[in-house]
Image (cartoon, grey):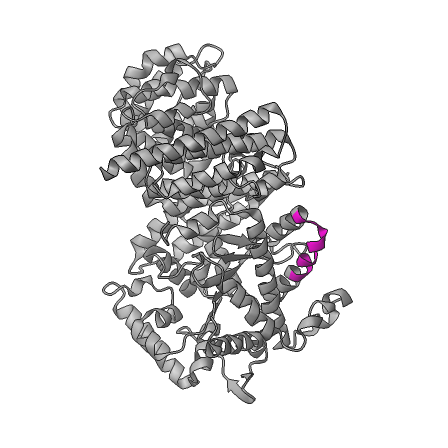
Amino acid sequence: MNDTELPILESLYDSQGRNDALITLLVELCHLLSACLRRDHAYSDRESEADSFEETIDVPLQIDPYAQLAKTLDKLNKRSGHDGTLLIRACGLSSKGNDKIFPDYQVFFSDIVMDRETVAMMIRRVGEHMSYLNALISKAFTTFDHHKVMTFHLKLPGKAPELFDRLRISIAIIAKYRRALDKAEDIEIQDNGDTIKLAVMKDEKGLPDPNLTMLAGLNGIRSDAMKVLVKEVCNWIKASDTSIGAHRYAGVYDAVAGVKNLRRKLILPPIELNNIRWLLMNRSIGKLPKAKAQIARLVDEEFENTSADQALYLESLYGRDYSRVNSRELGFRLKRISEMIESIGDRPKKSMILDEILANIQWRMEKVSDEVVSRLKVDNGLLTVQDGSEVFEIGRLHVMAARVVEFYTGRLNTREKMRQIGKGGNDFSPRDLDIISRDFDISPMDVKEILKLLKRCFDSEGRFNKIDFEECVAAFSRYEAKVFEILWHFLKQPMQREDRLAFLNALQLLFIKMETPEKALQVLLGDFLEEPDAVRFSDRNAVLLANLLLRRYNKELDIDIEITPEEVFLVKEGLNREAATAGLMLVDRDREAFFEKIRTIHRKIVMSLDPGYDNADKMGLKYLLSLEREIHVFIALLGGDVARSVLRSAINEYGNPDAEIYRLAEDRGTVEAFLQHLKVLVRGLGRSGERMDERTLHQIMDHNEDFLSFSKDNRHEALVKRVMQWADRSKEEIRSRSLTEMV
């Protein structure tokens, strides 16, 4: 096992118990940071109104919360698989106008994202004895909100005393910063018994900047010297915007922290507060992508409001919750995006900024439900939304923003016609053809011919007919470049199970005719990875079809299938090398999204085992396991480093009888489903594993008695026996292959 694989192994299928320990540690850290802020600052009159229970929270920390903070940071530092940073970021900004909504934040560390919901779910899972965490996190988030924290990026200080001293001074400055602004006075902090007065520093626009203030405090920079530094850096950015990469900096402080010559001369604060870049990045180290940096600068320069207001503009453009947004909030976001377009003016990077805005709003509008889109209306540029019985006026949109909205509202009728394509009297207008043409980047004439062929595949009652589809396959294949994308879009629409199965299987006939199946594979994987932090019902179909595309001939052609049979692990010569190579390149290129998707799916599997879990999307354990199974089959067929990492980490979970999933399983059927899953993993590793994997498979065989202890039922014993037999066969297969390669 190499060093780069270790974090993957620990994070993809991590036992929930290890995650719970880290979540608890992150709650503790937030509580300690907030306690330090409260101690270093008279928390305002509102603090005196806290009830007695809340006041007792800080009792153990009244002497020195920093001592405990140092211990907690040391524990985090010892965790493997992190990049040395932690990010706290406000979320649910659009809902904060509601007084009943408590302030909420997300805490990013390693592969964990902790928030109120995560903590609540953990408490339900492990027991009420952990309910004190709710009080800690609530107090911490309220403190962050009081200090107007939008983002709080922390570099773990390590054990060097001087590094922790810098952290202490930075927290003290943040604690006094808001009050200094309100009172128009200097910040006073204590450093080794000395009282230091520090003026609030300002950026190139003359606005207060907490990061420049911390920079001044750690380096002893006076106000006049900071003005000179800010001016010089600002001029450098403008002069070298296109030549040496300055266009990647979101602002002056970003450039100070990023330019090597300045970084060497100055002590950088271990904390960045409300730096706009961290509204656009998740716990990453490095520069912003240049398009995002330009957007950050646009918002920072043109919307000189509070950090919270600027965050709303960025949330409107980059929000990941568009699938859950309501019509009124969607209207406000579209208005903000329209204002961003209007503010571009003649900026040097105008085309880059405009492309970034349009690409992102189109990507996010794709996530909005048809029901919400149907409540939008644009009339002569004026956007209104239907909210219940009320029509609410949002305001006028820039012509480009208005066109985007008009396209998506107009597409609703076209989509409905697509769903009803097999029914009589369902004709497509030139406008429909134009919308589909734009949707799939294909000529309206070709769209017309494809729709004509597709209509022939349904009977008079609108039911899919596989025989008629077979007759159209040759004609479909003439439009290979785009036809599969349209057919796949149709398959994603809700349809009866019988029709879906027939359509899914009929597509195999098209695959045989395709000269470049890798293009279809690209469509499927692109759709599957489009939302790595979400799971959709179409995901399983995408991976199932991808598994079919990897083979030149499928024995299942004459039967209906819902899962890929295990016999595919025996496919050698029948593997489509071109498609497999393309799949391997796509997975390797988007490996981070691929890993995140796998984490998301497995996280939902663990969550579905929680009796208190609200399964709003109706995705049960059976569906989620079958989806994960298809992914494991797919990567085992591909082979390569990514496949081995995923399979090893999955076996590390399913092959461990002490893993959390087995403790959470409430019935024998669930345990047996996990063992069936393990059998697939074992066979997959036998196909793509290396010599080092023999030990992993041997460890599974050592757990034979532990797995048998789950049940004395004959069926269970037979299943465990089959798992062990396949572990032994896979071990021998790896050994034989290794010897052959050596020869």
Q: Where is residue 428 in the image (x, y as percent from the top left)?
A: 40, 22
Residue that appears at 31% across and 22% down: 511
Is any part of residue 380 visible from this angle?
A: no
Quarter in which the C terminus is drawn: top left
Up-down relation of residue 28 to residue 575 (above or below)? below
- Above or below, comparing residue 522 to residue 355 in the picture: above
Residue 306 lies, with reference to residue 389, above or below; the image says: below
- Judge by depth and name the residue closer to the eye, 628 or 366: 628
The one nearer the camera, 127 or 648, is 648
The number of callouts visible is 0
Residue 407 lies in the magenta stretch: no
Main secondary structure type of the part rendered in magenta? helix
**Which residue is at a point 59% across and 39% down the rendered structure image?**
662
- Residue 263: x and y in percent read 34, 74
- The residue lying furthest to the bottom in this view is 194
What x and y, as percent, mark residue 650? Answer: 47, 41
In the depicted structure, whether residue 406 falls above or below residue 346: above
Question: As rendered, which of 705 and 680 lies closer to the eye?
Answer: 705
Residue 239 in which image quadrant: bottom left
Residue 134, magenta (yes or no): yes
**Left or right of residue 454: residue 156:** right
Q: Residue 678's x, y, as percent?
A: 49, 34
Which residue range is magenta in the image?
Answer: 126-136
- Residue 67 in view (yes/no): yes
